[in-house]
């Protein structure tokens, strides 16, 4: 099964942490695309969730082979972000344009938007 979890806003919130928690759990049963668009791309930066009172989602059990981060290339670049400062170095990552993201979402059976 192919699943997409789309994070489009509130990257430093409980919603973003829950989105990744769901993606992590699903990764043991399905191939998961964690799609970040708009402000959601900031979730991938090296921020400290515990300093904001959230769980450290980086400690979640996750099947790294089944999770692919899909990053809207334009949203990433316009915000001046750098691939060197991301916490997802051990995961597969695709820098994609809107058409490529649409193709990924089209082929998934389940899409959750946060």
Image (cartoon, rainbow, N blue to C red):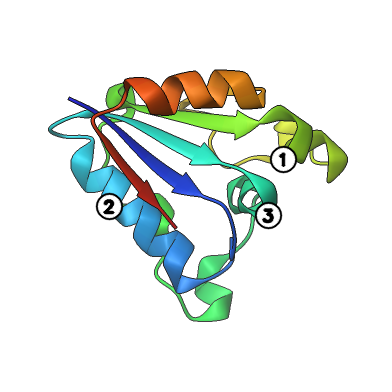
Question: Nearest the camera: 93 or 73?
Answer: 73
* Mark 1 element type: helix
Residue under the image location 44 percent in, 22 percent down: 104
The percent position of residue 48, horizontal first and vertical second, equals 59, 64
Residue 32, relative to residue 52: is it above or below? above
Q: CA distance from mark 2 to mark 1?
A: 24 Å
Q: In the drawing, what numbered circle is on residue 25?
A: none
- Circle 2: element type: helix
Mark 1 Cα shell of 10 Å, populated few (<14), some (14-19), many (≥20): few
Residue 26 in percent (x, y) is at 20, 41
Q: Is residue 65 left or right of residue 34?
A: left
| Contact, mark 1 vs mark 3 (Cβ under 8 Å) | no
Which is nearer the N-term, disc 1 or disc 3?
A: 3
Q: Which numbered dot is residue 85?
A: 1
Q: Secondary structure at mark 3?
A: helix
Task: Please tell me the numbered disc located at residue 39.
Answer: 3
Residue sitting at 23 percent across and 35 percent down?
Answer: 27
Residue 85 at what x, y percent from top left?
A: 72, 40
- In the rendered image, which quarter is residue 74 located in? top right
* Residue assigned mark 2: 22
At label 2, counting other C-alpha atoms closer than 10 Å, the crowd grade (few under 14, some 14-19, many 20 or more) is some
């Amino acid at each position: 099964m192919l699943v997409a979890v789309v994070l489009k806003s509130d990257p430093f919130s409980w919603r973003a942490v829950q989105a990744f928690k769901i993606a992590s759990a699903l990764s043991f049963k399905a191939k998961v695309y964690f799609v970040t668009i708009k402000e959601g791309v900031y979730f991938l930066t090296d921020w400290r969730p515990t300093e904001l009172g959230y769980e450290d989602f980086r400690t979640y059990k996750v099947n790294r082979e089944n999770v692919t981060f899909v990053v809207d290339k334009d949203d990433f670049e316009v915000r001046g972000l750098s691939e060197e400062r991301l916490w997802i170095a051990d995961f597969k990552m695709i820098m994609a344009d809107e058409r490529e993201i649409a193709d990924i979402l089209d082929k998934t059976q389940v899409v959750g938007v946060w």
